[in-house]
Image (cartoon, rainbow, N blue to C red):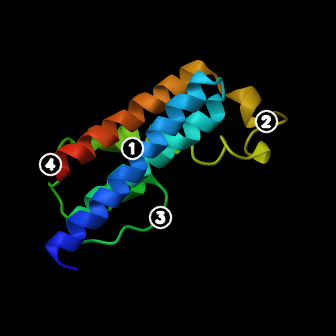
Amino acid sequence: MSQTEDRHEAERWLKTAEEDLQAATALQQAGMYAHACFLSQQCGEKAVKAIWHLIGEEPWGHSIQRLVMQFPKPGFLTERENWLQRAASLDKFYIPTRYPNGLPDLTPGQSYFIKDAEQAIELAVFFLEAAREYLS
């Protein structure tokens, strides 16, 4: 792809990440904390994938931590260790927030609380703002 096409694809991923964050916030306000946590993870994942697309690469997978670890341009992501820690925290919301067999005896709706949703949204905002900076 050309740089123009790469930027366009990156912007599409960033826009979708922004929409995921809006939905996560609405779900948090509605008391649907597990769903808010999952969509926050999705926001972070798509924000990091936007940066991959910006540099002309094709990201694969759903782990934000792995996407950061395997980022193709070493040194491009500033404060990589900080990114990895935040990514690991956000990745923990990927599976157990969606499936009742991801947690013993309870449903995700019984296991996640407002504090979890607030943490997840805060982490998502970090990745979204970082991606916006790289795209600006």
| In front: label 4 or label 3 | 4
Spatial CA distance of label 2 from label 3 is 25 Å
Q: Contact (CB < 8 A) between labels 4 and 3?
A: no
Which quadrant of the figure contains the N terminus? bottom left
Spatial CA distance of label 4 from label 3 is 25 Å
Question: Tag 3: residue type?
Answer: Gly
Pointer 2 or 3: first along the chain: 3
- In the image, 80 versus 61, the foreground residue is 61
Residue where numbered disc 3 is placed: 61
Q: Is residue 132 left or right of residue 44?
A: left
State the mark number for residue 136: 4
Looking at the image, can residue 35 be seen?
A: yes
Q: Contact (CB < 8 A) between labels 1 and 4?
A: no
- Judged from the image, the secondary structure of the residue bearing numbered disc 1 is helix
Residue where numbered disc 1 is placed: 18
- Judged from the image, the secondary structure of the residue bearing numbered disc 2 is loop
